Image (cartoon, coloured by chain):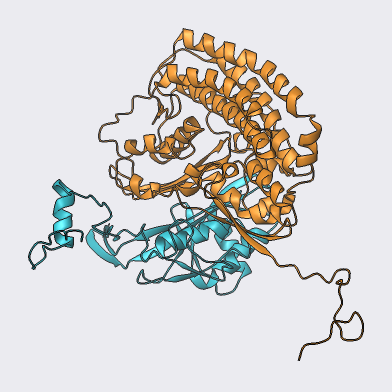
Amino acid sequence: MESLEEIKDRIEAAMAGVRLAIEGKSLVVGRQHLLDVVRFLKDDTGLAMDYCSNLCAVDWLPRTIKTRECDRDVQRDVPGHLEVVYDFYSMAKKHGPLQLRCRTEGREGTPSLPSITPLFRGAEFQEREAFDLYGIRFEGHPDLRRILMWDGFKSFPMRKDYRPPDDYEYEPTPHDEVLEKAKQHWPAPASAPVTPSKPA
Amino acid sequence: MIQPLTTTGSGYELMPKEGAIETQTLEVSMGPHHPSTHGVFRMDVVLDGEEVTRLKPVFGYLHRNHEQLAEQMNWLGSIPFTDRLDYFCSMSNNWAYCHAVEQLAGIKVAERAEYIRVIMAELTRLINHSCLAGFLLSDAGAWGTPLLYAFREREKILDLFEAASGARMMCNYMRFGGVRADVDDDWLAAARKVVGNYPAFLDELEALITGNEILLARTQHIGILPRELAINASITGPMLRASGVDYDIRKVDRYGIYDRFDFRVPLGEVGDVYDRYYVRMLEMRESVKILQQALCDIPEGPFDAGVKMRNFKVPAGDGYGRIEAPKGELGFYLVSEGGTRPYRYHVRAPSFINLTILENMCLGHKVADAMVILGSVDIVLGEVDR
């Protein structure tokens, strides 16, 4: 398979206005060009990436990256975002992987990304999983519902700032840590203790 | 005003005309507690008569957020949890995770451990495929008997696992750079005996079921998965190869030491349930070949690479590692920030993704066939729900 630089150059030459970045072993593509780039990878005869093996989301909290450039310490603030990682292989040419990344704008609420399910059916459940656990809305997905959590669930449990509810561990007679949590959750009733009513 | 009851004129007829019977579709919720769903799995089926017109898989009943658990413990700590993904094939789950971590951390695996891993993984494949044949027959109505034939052989392999790792199913056996405990010569001799007897068992099983008329009628041309759809829907493992796609990660990636063994990749022609069953049968014969070579060639030497497990850290970076597990491509996507625990830990579970096209395969078939088709997908809910 060609090197990442060659693939990047070819994509940028084939499509006007598309800019890619190389980070580590993966190509980073902007949201507005994701579908075009994925379609190119799939249809290009040299690459023939016909198999989307893995699709998963990563949650990045706001960070400060410290680097040293030209003998100076540089601090760079990276805003928080959600990132989707795609691993493509070619079953026809038996090569790969080619890793693609795409980032959402911010991580408040349910940020959106284009869905690649119309191109790769194999992304259907994986995108539903990323929606379910991370809250990424995939625009164009035919059936975007929760898949692992139940339908009435409110939050997104794989986010790094997710806190489980403190009453998830119900005990009839709480003790130790659970008791401490239970105290926060259920303050002692102000009224007199309830006595069980006698049956008439 | 009440119309007079006549057979002519008023449009009221005693017998409805041919084809004019109004039927209504019926929505049936199959599962989560249904013997054919192999665990807590539900199919929302819409039936027209007995024909499936819509089928939506519903799962998540066994969801325990395995990925988040792993992100909250150190790298070593999640190996026992990987056992519980696909609880039939704990050895290959261990290997997939260790393989991904070794790729990321750049650990070289000890030579003897590579052989032990291949032996364990291929034994696991034997267990998985023989039991699948039994379960498939159970779904088709042959209650118990074929499954018990398979379980009888599985016991012998589980005894081997118990002797090597201390546990029969939750083996927790592989470690980064090697395995947890060495196997001795007695174990190897016992393994050679089990492997040597396996072809006879396969002959017996095939004599019982492969040419069976009822099995042929229930499985041939049922649930056909076309080649193009299989590739597009990221189907992997025996299901993909039954549709005629030559893609075996043992051959493509040649991870571990699979380039040293002589084996072939069986392919199906039609892509129906029967092909999926028979490809697995043939794969077991190839696994026996690999096992015989590995048990013959296994060298002496250390069984681990001397990686210090306490305070084990992985250099910052990310990577995707995959192996050919019995059910398909089992991959782990890991992100490390250089610490003692993963920042992101994702399992690419084969049976989860193989379920994507369950509806496509079942449409137009009878509801009894839907169970056989589901049986041929080979799912384990521990892995689907994670």
Does residue A47 appear in this view?
no
Q: Residue furthest front?
A: A200
Q: Tell me where residue B212 appears, x and y as whole percent.
A: 79, 30
Does residue B98 appear in this view?
yes
Q: Tell me where residue B199 appears, x and y as whole percent.
A: 68, 18
Image height of B148 relative to B230, above or below: above
Q: Tell me where residue B101 appears, x and y as whole percent.
A: 41, 39
Residue name at image x 60 percent, y 34 percent:
B250
Image height of B213 relative to B186, above or below: below
- Which chain corresponds to the colour orange? B
Task: Classify the position of the N terminus of chain B by image quarter.
Answer: bottom right
Residue name at image x 26 percent, y 51 percent:
A169
Q: Colour of chain A?
A: cyan
Q: Where, by quadrant of the figure, is residue A193 drawn?
A: bottom left
Q: Nearer the viewer, residue B153 or A63?
A: B153
Q: Nearer the viewer, residue B213 or B79?
A: B213
Image height of A71 relative to B279, above or below: below
Q: Residue furthest bottom?
A: B1
Residue name at image x 52 percent, y 43 percent:
B39
Q: Say whether residue A151 is left or right of residue A52.
A: left
Q: Nearer the viewer, residue A103 or A186?
A: A186
